[in-house]
Amino acid sequence: MDSATQTFFKDLLTKRLNELYSEAEKRVASLAATEENLPDPTDRAAADSDKNFMFSVWEREQKLIVKIREALQRIDEGGFSECEECGDDIGIERLKARPVTTLCVTCKRKQEAAERGRGA
């Protein structure tokens, strides 16, 4: 992968990482600002449901942050576009669609087929 392409993906991933951090800050501020003294059981249940949803989103975002950091590290180390399974090139179009991917299309299909076979 040439330097310009590496810079493109590094900028793309860094921008997404910054967006995730910004969204997390807003979410924390929103949780801190919510009123906890809700006398109506239905209102409390709705507030609890909203919090549970926000926490599940937060957990997904935390996993994505880890993947983005790992992708940025692979860019720095020079292995960003290399499939971790077979060593082949992942391909620019696949990386544009999913910049945190570590598998080429062929290996990903094999992985998904194995997961379906295990019932996962």
Image: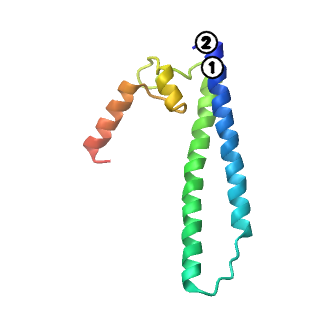
Q: From the viewer's side, name the closer residue of 87 and 91.
A: 91
Q: From the viewer's side, name the closer residue of 70 and 18.
A: 18
Label 2 crowd bin: few (<14), some (14–19), many (20+), radius 10 Å: few
- The kind of residue on which mark 1 rests is Gln
Q: How is the image coloured?
A: rainbow
The quarter of the picture where residue 114 lies is top left
Label 1 crowd bin: few (<14), some (14–19), many (20+), radius 10 Å: some
Mark 1 lies on a secondary structure that is helix
Q: On the image, numbered disc 1 is attached to which residue?
A: 6
Q: Residue at x 59, y 61 (%)?
A: 54
Q: Residue 2: which numbered mark, if any?
A: 2
Q: Position of residue 88 (x, y in %)?
A: 44, 17
Above-or-below relation of 32 to 108: below
| Residue found farthest to the left | 117
The quarter of the picture where residue 79 lies is top right
- Give the CA distance from mark 2 to mark 1: 6 Å
- The kind of residue on which mark 2 rests is Asp
In which quadrant will I find the N terminus? top right
The quarter of the picture where residue 39 lies is bottom right
Q: Residue at x 49, y 29 (%)?
A: 102
In the rendered view, does 91 fall on the left or right side of 1? left
Q: Residue at x 64, y 23 (%)?
A: 8
Above-or-below relation of 13 to 53: above
Q: Residue at x 54, y 58 (%)?
A: 56
Above-or-below relation of 38 to 87: below
CB contact under 8 Å: marks 2 and 1: yes
